[in-house]
Image (cartoon, rainbow, N blue to C red):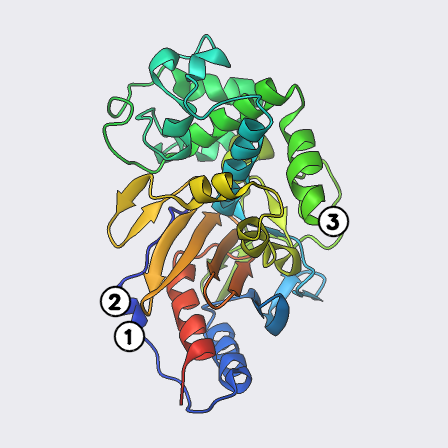
């Protein structure tokens, strides 16, 4: 699963685009070029002040059936899921059902060292627990298909990386645990709480946590690059990614997510500030509660990326300009953050 990415100056300087005040032609040309060179297959959508200013889809959601990608295609968004979990934890805190300062042991009393690990540590990747997704035998999980509880046991007794709060290290296992905490605190299955208290209030209809056995209309098949083409990806089962990366979303809905959160659609002003506060300082950026805050061309923006077998994702929101950008792909790629930089430069470039 792809780690959240903060953008460097070298990326800002990459690419060259035609002059002009209307970004549509050069953006469209850029996306076509990326698709022609097999650098991107999926959807790019941009809104400004709530209005769609650009959208373009390239490639196929299903190669075998020649079904095209669209802005309403359901993509696996991988680690972008973490921003939804961060919001859910803050919402439960507003409801008085948990505190981010609570120890993990309050909700999972049998978890090793849980009395010294807080929910804040889990959300900010500072817990020090073993990150199961760093193992080399992940392929076995596609065959075993463990339950969520069984999967938790796989990393619970592994050696820790460091003491809680000592440092930052991106950690998917921590968000798996947060999914279980949300269940304990809310008294609901994780998916039910997320649907009723996070997704539905946003007006999302297709953005959901889909189980493996669900038939999902319009969901893209997942692929990986293979030679000059693509082959079907060997996907993780849902329980393995769960609250760390199990969300599926359409570009048309996801592009509304960060603007909606910052406008107070789900959270109080205090919780919104906690969502994007500099809890952990990173090179050129900081990590909030499931979201990165960084600068691009000197402008603050929130972002998060994601990557799983069969899907890659990137979202960003520039509050000052009210520009929201979403790039979703049904192909495993490592460079979507860099492609986002090129897309934003093409969109926001002055002649």
Label 2 packing within 10 angstroms: few (<14), some (14-19), many (20+): few
x, y percent for residue 150: 52, 18
Q: Identify the residue position indicated by label 2 in the image.
A: 9
Measured from the top left, where is residue 317 in percent x and y? 48, 60
Q: Residue at x 57, y 41 (%)?
A: 267
Image vertical order of residue 166 relative to residue 45, above or below: above
The residue tagged 1 is 13
Residue occupying the point 47% across, 59% down: 316
Q: In this view, does 344 lie to the left or right of 135?
A: right
Q: Residue 205 carries which label?
A: 3
Cα gap from disc 2 to disc 3, whole angstroms: 38 Å
Query: Helix, strand or loop at disc 1?
Result: loop
The local crowd at label 3, few if under 14, some if 14 to 19, many if 20 or more residues have their Cα within 10 Å, is few
C-alpha gap between disc 3 and disc 1: 38 Å
As drawn, 137 above or below 63: above
Q: Which residue is drawn at 71% across and 43% down?
A: 200
**Res 208 quadrant in image:** top right
The residue shown at (54%, 80%) is 28
Residue 294 on image: x %, y %: 34, 56
Q: Is residue 146 visible?
A: no
Disc 1 versus disc 2: distance between alpha carbons? 7 Å
Look at the numbered discs 1 and 2 and tell me whether their residues touch, using CB distance below 8 Å. Answer: yes
Q: Earlier in the sequence, mark 2 or mark 3?
A: 2
Question: Which of disc 1 and disc 3 is earlier in sequence?
Answer: 1
**In-front residue for pair 116/170:** 116
């Amino acid at each position: 699963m792809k780690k959240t990415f903060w953008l460097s100056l070298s990326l800002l300087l990459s690419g060259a685009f035609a002059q002009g005040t209307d970004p549509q032609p050069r953006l469209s040309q850029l996306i076509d070029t990326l698709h022609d060179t097999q650098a991107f297959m999926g959807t790019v959508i941009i809104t400004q002040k709530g209005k769609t200013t650009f959208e373009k889809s390239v490639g196929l959601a299903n190669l075998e059936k020649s079904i095209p990608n669209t802005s309403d295609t359901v993509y696996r968004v991988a680690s972008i899921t973490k921003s939804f979990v961060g919001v859910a934890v803050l919402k439960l805190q507003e409801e008085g059902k948990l505190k981010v300062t609570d120890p993990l042991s309050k909700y999972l009393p049998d978890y090793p060292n849980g009395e010294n690990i807080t929910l804040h540590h889990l959300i900010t990747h500072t817990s020090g627990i073993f990150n199961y997704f760093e193992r080399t035998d992940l392929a076995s999980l596609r065959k075993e298909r463990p339950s969520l509880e069984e999967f938790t046991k796989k990393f619970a007794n592994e050696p820790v990386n460091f003491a809680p709060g000592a440092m930052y290290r991106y950690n998917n296992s921590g968000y798996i645990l947060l999914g279980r905490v949300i269940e304990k605190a809310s008294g609901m299955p994780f998916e039910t709480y997320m649907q009723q208290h996070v997704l539905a209030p946003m007006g999302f209809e297709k953005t959901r946590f889909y189980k493996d056995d669900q038939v999902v209309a319009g969901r893209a098949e997942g692929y990986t690059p293979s030679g000059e083409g693509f082959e079907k990806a060997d996907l993780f089962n849902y329980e393995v990614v769960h609250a760390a990366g199990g969300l599926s979303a359409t570009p048309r809905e996801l592009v509304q997510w960060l603007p909606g959160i910052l406008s107070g659609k789900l959270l109080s002003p205090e919780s919104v500030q906690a969502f994007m506060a500099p809890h952990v300082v990173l090179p050129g950026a900081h990590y909030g509660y499931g979201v990165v805050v960084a600068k691009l061309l000197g402008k603050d923006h929130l972002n998060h990326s994601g990557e799983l077998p069969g899907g890659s994702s990137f979202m960003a929101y520039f509050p000052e300009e009210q520009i929201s950008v979403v790039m979703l792909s049904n192909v495993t790629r490592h460079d979507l953050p860099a492609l986002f930089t090129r897309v934003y430069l093409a969109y926001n470039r002055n002649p």
